[in-house]
Amino acid sequence: ARELHHYLKSIQPKTLILNGDIFDMWNFRKSYFPTEHMEVVRRLLKMAVNGTKIYYLTGNHDDVLRKFGEMSLGLIHLRNKLVFQVDGRTHWVFHGDVFDSSIQRARWLAKLGSEGYDMLIRINRVINGTRRLLGLGPVSFSARIKKGVKSAVKYINDFEDTAIKIAAEKEYDCVICGHIHQPQMREVPTENGKSITYMNSGDWVEHLSALEYSDAQWRIYQYDKLDFDVTNPRLQVKEAAGNVFS
């Protein structure tokens, strides 16, 4: 949350899309809401007041919001999916959990997997803290597991292939997802000779990544703490004239 707050303070987008799982309502507790989390909420509200149009798309961890359908509160808009055009190209944005059979059919299994992932992240943070003291770079256990387990690799590939196939059938130019925590951007040729741009914004739990659109171009943003170190001469406020997706 601290890194996300730093990032949000550094940008001035016209449109901000939060692509699901912003609030973990599966594990929400009234007794636990850290100051860093509240700062993110305040920053988002301030951005909306200052003119940024914010779309909140529902994910699996905040799917309880789906029962409200589409609604708007000022410049904050709740949606399950979003279709829009930029520079003549049609973009389809959604979280992606609708492709996850474990969530649709065995919610208890999905929650168990979520708790296991959270525990792995906490252990990962402790180990990376020790590695930093030793002058070593960070490691990601979850990334290694996803790359090393055949079923995980197959799930990710199937997820991406399904999103691309449906986008091609709907004749969209770009499809933007979240859910699988794998930041990516690539062009995929389709059977009709048309190319689909597949993008995934990653997450702010492990990869600290987002998608940005400015100067008629998409790119993956990767958080670097040196960019926000007041002792770093490279520190500057980054103004993003386009759209930002997280």
Image (cartoon, grey):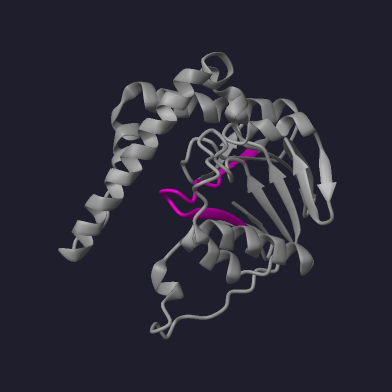
* 188 shown above or below 162: below
Instruction: Give the residue drawn at x 40%, y 68%.
Output: 225
Instruction: Give the residue drawn at x 27%, y 49%.
Output: 139
Q: Is residue 157 visible?
A: yes
Q: Is residue 93 magenta?
A: no
Q: Is residue 203 magenta?
A: yes
In the picture, measured across the screen, residue 135 lies left or right of residue 110, that is left
Where is residue 203 shown, x and y percent of the image? Answer: 50, 47
The answer to which of 186 and 227 lies nearer the viewer is 227
Residue at the extreme left:
134
Where is residue 60 shown, x and y percent of the image? Answer: 59, 31
In the picture, measured across the screen, residue 113 lies left or right of residue 11, that is left
In the picture, measured across the screen, residue 95 lies left or right of residue 181, that is right
In the picture, measured across the screen, residue 234 lies left or right of residue 68, that is left
Where is residue 130 shown, x and y percent of the image? Answer: 19, 58
Magenta stretch bounds: 196-213
The answer to which of 174 and 113 lies nearer the viewer is 113
Instruction: Give the residue drawn at x 83%, y 47%.
Output: 72
* 107 shown above or below 58: above
Instruction: Give the residue drawn at x 77%, y 40%.
Output: 83
Q: Is residue 191 visible?
A: no
The answer to which of 209 and 4 lies nearer the viewer is 4
Where is residue 70 shown, x and y percent of the image? Answer: 81, 37
